[in-house]
Image (cartoon, coloured by chain):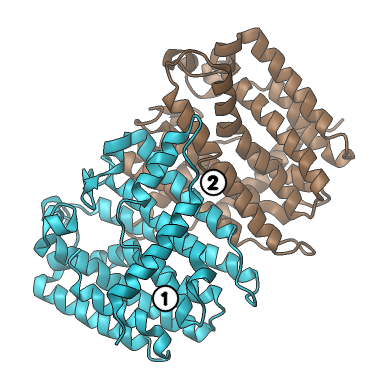
Chain colours: A brown, B cyan
Amino acid sequence: MMDLQVYLSKKREIVDRALEALFPEPQGPASDVVRAMTYSVFAGGKRLRPILCIAGAETAGGESRHVLQAACALELIHTYSLIHDDLPVMDDDDLRRGKPTNHKVFGEAIALLAGDGLLTEAFCVLAGMPVPEGTPSTVLTRVIRWIAEAAGYSGMIGGQVADVQSEGAPPDAELVRFIHEHKTADLITVATVSGALLCGAEESAIRALSSYGRRIGLAFQISDDILNIEGDKQTLGKDVGSDEKRGKQTWPAVFGLEEAKRAQRDLVLEAVESLNPFDHRADPLRAIAMYIIERRK
Amino acid sequence: MMDLQVYLSKKREIVDRALEALFPEPQGPASDVVRAMTYSVFAGGKRLRPILCIAGAETAGGESRHVLQAACALELIHTYSLIHDDLPVMDDDDLRRGKPTNHKVFGEAIALLAGDGLLTEAFCVLAGMPVPEGTPSTVLTRVIRWIAEAAGYSGMIGGQVADVQSEGAPPDAELVRFIHEHKTADLITVATVSGALLCGAEESAIRALSSYGRRIGLAFQISDDILNIEGDKQTLGKDVGSDEKRGKQTWPAVFGLEEAKRAQRDLVLEAVESLNPFDHRADPLRAIAMYIIERRK
């Protein structure tokens, strides 16, 4: 059995170094927005999406270096979504990963623009990345399109809209599934798939990875819901109990805490099962799935 | 001499029809964001950037249909920037093109997400567009990268940051040039260039078009500054005099109104001169440059 913690910290370091290389020294009249962008990018994220992209690439026989820029782009998109979600007009959060949220440090105008900047930069990085040798260049535009769809109004943004608008509404099973699938699972799915696509994976492999991603994405959001009830504020670096206070649609709110835990376990097992077509190179993905059940932050 | 008004209205119609085809009927839990996106996209824009993209393509021997999706993507990016600029944390505008601004109709949370959605959709549309026959597919990723750069923190967003942060500061020639070049001219330049690039224009043609775009972009923003002083509120569909009230960095504020008018004329003449390498197929671009001096809205 592989040591997941070693794997994660090794990949996290590779991703962090690649992210650092993306940003220039802040200078000139617009330097504050670069400062604000890097503040949130280097605020201690787990790098789950980039690592899934890399692990997906490895499953298809590729390596980190083949997909690093796509991995970074996914983290930029994730970070932009957190900055905008934390704004007063949205969730109005003061703390994120134990640090003041972006607008608390840089003000709302710059935070808004920093989010816009990260989203835009993600596509700049994607479009400028070299395609691994042997992969047709049209694969890159397919990946860009898939990522944009997953992040857009029929994906992450759509989930966010439903999330914001359903605060305080009665618990609704169909709605919570819509929110979790789009707000969280869509980007996690495309993260897993994009690395493999760039490394020339066949359609059947992409289908298997997509099914894995969808399930761990949903499981990940359910575990977020559970941590918001049972987690430790210190470890999480954010407030606990906020979902209930706001009347958010969560799995525990709709189905109860025990059922949420069961759903999460079932999803993780199904996700691991989706990886049956793959050999040992999918072990990191298998281990990441199991880690979702155990995580404390 | 060509009839510019006929040309503009014909192209505007083609662009409007292509934009309409991009959006689905709003349905499901996230339908409000689609409604908000389309509200601003169809709020009566001049479609200047899409038309420049098409006119650039025609200059290079292409046709509207070859670059329509890129043209639409540019309008989506422009529209997202207006929605975010109008938000209370930014310029706090109630009126845009004579209609209530997005957040006035849909609320700030949905307006923020509608902007995010339009920006993301722009890259989805770009990455999914067919490349004109005979153009290598790597040109598309080059165009996507160039557009993302022009829209990002070293382009439009950078200009917006400087604009927001310099309100009330003493008039500064270097700063107003930075703001106008990045906030406005960068996207207008890439609009002009991208259509030609997609239609296989050579590097020397791209350089000429880029020089044209940079100059009319700057001239266009200066004419905006002038209209904010001398324009008619009814015709413009927005408040007049707001720049001075807010202490914005504008060309008239820094150099005086007469000098601003002279700079605008000089830039337009230089822009037209940049088109000397091209034949009659660049006539629409020539006419658009002249129109900037005469426009009333």
| Residue A94 percent across, percent down from the top left | 39, 27
In-front residue for pair A235/B297: B297
Q: Is residue A27 above or below residue A239?
A: below
What crowding class fits label 1: few (fewer than 14 Cα within 10 Å), some (14-19), or many (20 or more)? many
Could one spot residue A216 in this view of the protein?
Answer: yes
Mark 1 lies on a secondary structure that is helix
The answer to which of A37 and A215 lies nearer the viewer is A215
In the rendered image, which quarter contains the N terminus of chain A?
Answer: top right
User: Is residue B149 among what the camera can see?
Assistant: no
Q: Amino acid at mark 2?
A: Leu
Q: At x 61% / y 64%, what residue is drawn?
A: B130
* Quadrant (top left, top right, bottom left, bottom right) of the C terminus of chain A: top right
Using the image, name the chain to which the residue with label 1 belongs: B
Bin the neighbour count of mark 2 within 10 Å (Cα to Cα): few under 14, some 14-19, many 20 and up.
many
Q: Do the residues at discs 2 and 1 belong to one chain?
A: no
Residue A85 is situated, as x and y percent measured from the top left of the image, at 44, 33
Q: Residue at x 87, y 40 (%)?
A: A278
Residue for badge 1: B55
- Marks 2 & 1, CB-CB < 8 Å contact: no
The image position of residue A64, as x and y in percent, is 73, 50
Residue A10 appears left or right of A1:
left
Look at label 1 and name its amino acid: Ala
Q: In the rendered image of this protein, does residue A193 appear above or below residue B52?
A: above
- Is residue B173 found left or right of A104 in the rendered image? left
- Helix, strand or loop at mark 2: helix
Q: Which mark is residue A76?
A: 2
Q: Quadrant of residue B156?
A: bottom left
In the rendered image, the vertical position of residue B5 relative to residue A264, given as above or below? below
